[in-house]
Amino acid sequence: MIAQRSYGLTTSPCEGLRVLETIGEMKGARDRTLTDDEIFAFWRAASRMPYPHGHVYRVLILTGLRLNEAADASWPEFKHNGIWVISAERMKGKNAGKKQARAHAVPITDALAAVLKDIPRFNGGTYLFSTTNGESAVWMGSKIKERLDRRMLLTLRALARMRGDDPASVELLPFVNHDIRRTVRSRLSRLKVTEEAREAVLAHARPGIKGVYDLHDYLDEKREALDLWAARLREVTQPQPTNVVQIRARV
């Protein structure tokens, strides 16, 4: 409430203002996810992008992490056997008295381990993804995303050409880095992963009393969910040739 007596106001200066006229239409929740062809193109593009940017993108789609949670990773976070522990300070927190972020344990699946194995180690620097010999974390700016998009579009058009479609008519619908996370969440649902495990993979705070007292971190469930997703991702990105006939031996 404005101090009416101090300024001699008799009515609110906001009276008569319309929300839509002042700030415009409210943006709806995003629902963009990647299709199988787009996932194929994404993985192909990320695998062909040089270190460190391509490696970050592959980690994103394997884990469902937020961009900075992956890009700012450091080697001390991997001191636990088979687990990547991201500190509470690095996780997305909430202020104003609401629930604070908690440390997040990411199971290191075989697919994730393969990406980590391909990362160079620097003398002195501790950041995994870096252009400064590990002294600072990589910056995943808009130009990097544009490079990824261009590579993806080339692959999508090549797929169209193989199908006999007109490649010139193919476009890549816009998507942001956070849509990769949404894609992982959506695909876990398709794989019939439980809601608790899906939410644990994405490090979403649990509502109500469960978020306060249930300290079970669902590590085994998260590992199983991410293994299932890695297997599905492998099916999408490494499809079997259609002209191969499987021959089973008779017993």
Image (cartoon, rainbow, N blue to C red):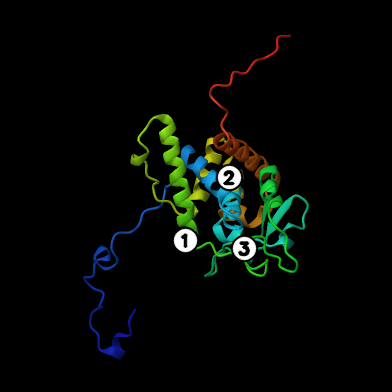
What is the C-alpha distance between the residues marked 3 and 2?
Answer: 23 Å
Which of the numbered marks, if any, corresponds to residue 198? Answer: 2
Q: For the residue labelled by badge 3, is the local secondary structure a helix, a strand or a loop?
A: loop
What is the C-alpha distance between the residues marked 1 and 2?
Answer: 31 Å
Mark 2 Cα-neighbour bin, 10 Å: few <14, some 14–19, many ≥20? many
- Tell me the kind of residue under disc 2: Arg
Reply above or below: 155 against 137. above
Q: Which residue is mark 1?
A: 143
Q: For marks 3 and 2, give the one nearer the viewer.
A: 3
- Residue furthest to the top in view is 251
Near-viewer residue (7 or 76) = 76
Count numbered badges in the picture: 3
Residue 37: where, in percent of width, then height?
A: 47, 38
- Residue at 23 percent of width and 73 percent of height: 15
What is the C-alpha distance between the residues marked 1 and 3?
Answer: 18 Å
Instruction: Find residue 79 and report its image quarter.
Output: bottom right
Q: For the residue labelled by badge 2, is the local secondary structure a helix, a strand or a loop?
A: helix
